[in-house]
Amino acid sequence: MNNSRGLLYPALHKFYSALSSLEKFEKGTNFFDNIGYLDNFFSEYRNITFVLQHSLAHTDFLATYEKLRNEYLVNSVGKWFVEKRNEVLKQQPFDLEKRIVITIYSAEATVSLPELIFTIDNDVEISTIVDSLRVTFMSLRQLEVMFSSEFFFYEHGHTEDLYDSFIFGINQMRLLLAVLKQAINEHCKLSDELESKIELMNFYRVPKDFLLVDDYVFFAKKDRFEKGSRVTMWGGHGQTKSPIENLNKAYPNGDLFSKFELMHLVTFQMQKTLLPSCLVVYGDDTFELLTFGFSIKTTVYRKFNEIAKRIEADAITNVLFVTEMYVYDPKHLNEDSRERVKHAQKEILAFYMVDKELAMKSHAYDTNKVDDFNYIASVMFVKPKKPELPYFMNPVIREFDRLKSNQKTL
């Protein structure tokens, strides 16, 4: 082996090759290609440990590697990866199963259609599925129908989500290689280049919904589907929570809602715009800030449905939201959102809050006046009226209400 190459270079190259295969795996790709990408992933992922053993066989670091291998890779996911590698190399291609759930959102309810299940034997294009919903949506007699398509991938006959297994396995291997790099403590230009490339890969770096969920709206008058686009600010898997004390230090005065308002009003004064942000507070006095942008309102309906599903399991106690919104004359409410925007009277910066006790707050600021601190004070400290929360927050309100009612019956 070339002596200029570090001990970890072969393993990092195999890890890079494994991740490169997953980068090509996409929800809309045909089964033949996706199965090929998975087969390559399992093979290259397993080869990482083979080349590590070979590289370190005659060094003082072999015992360190074996200890780290047992710590990070000896688990149910690691065992499954080994089994699949042996299977796809010696027996048959990976037996992939795809499931698609279509969810329809409205102010009154969220409805999921029966799950669609596909294998390599009966796969169809997602565009065909979406187009087949046209008759159903027309029968709803709504101006616009908001819906999403969510993809799930499994090994056929099993219930473990492939995405979760891949993310766990990738992160465990990253940890092993990072700790081993510290122990070996050598400089290798090729290894550094590979690490930089790995850090830029998307599969394990972007939120799950960006990979596996698409948002749509159907405009009934125009008989037209529109697929949404999105942006997000994301800290990565398991890196998003912060102590609520950090927020209290930065904004020592007022209650949580006031701190949230002030934080985003200051941002808006500087930028004259902001991405919608949802602050989720947990029972352990930590919080998470979910900041995202969207081209169609389906995305925000889906986001609040996702938060509602997590409330009980994650002990969520409070949900706050800020977004820019348009104000319309009521006479335009019979037009769809694309038509109404042409008749907007003004733009507001709207703040909303609901907690587990069903305490609610809302404030709206005219975006043309937010540089006026007297105006801000007149809105922030005025005697509160009965708050009006937007329809898209209804799933969160209903879930807090359900949990509160259950506590009363205990």
Image (tube, grey):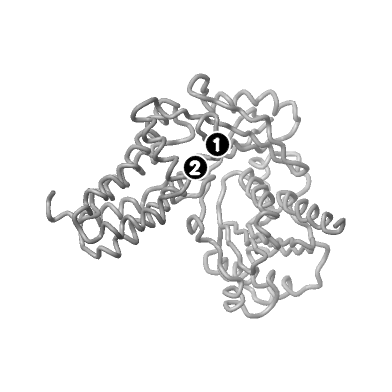
**First along the sequence among labels 2 and 1:** 1
Query: Which residue is situated farthest in the top direction here?
Result: 121
Looking at the picture, tell me which residue is in the foreground, 395 or 362.
395
User: Which label was assigned to residue 204?
Assistant: none
Q: Does 104 sit above or below residue 303?
A: above
State left or right for residue 58 relative to residue 374.
Answer: left
Looking at the picture, tell me which residue is in the foreground, 345 or 237.
237
State left or right for residue 116 relative to residue 400.
Answer: left
Looking at numbered disc 2 in the image, what kind of residue is underneath it?
Answer: Tyr
Q: Please indicate, yes or no, whether residue 342 appears anywhere in the rendered image.
A: no
- x, y percent for residue 171: 42, 52
Q: In terms of image quadrants, where is residue 222?
A: top right
- x, y percent for residue 235: 48, 59
Q: What is the quadrant of the C terminus in the image?
A: bottom right
Q: In terms of image quadrants, where is residue 409?
A: bottom right
State left or right for residue 86 relative to residue 206.
Answer: left
User: Answer yes or no: do the residues labelled 2 and 1 have beta carbons within 8 Å?
Assistant: yes
Q: Which residue shows up at 55% across the image and 36% down it?
A: 151
Q: Which residue shows up at 66% across the image and 80% down it?
A: 253
Provide the residue designation for mark 2: 163
- x, y percent for residue 401: 80, 55
Question: Tag 1's secondary structure?
Answer: strand
Q: Which residue shows up at 54% across the image and 27% down it?
A: 127
Label 1 environment density (alpha carbons within 10 Å; few <14, some 14–19, many ≥20): some
Q: In terms of image quadrants, where is residue 88?
A: top left
Provide the residue designation for mark 1: 152
Q: Which residue shows up at 55% across the image and 33% down it?
A: 158
Looking at numbered disc 1 in the image, what kind of residue is underneath it?
Answer: Phe
- x, y percent for residue 316: 68, 60
CA separation in Å, label 2 and label 1: 8 Å
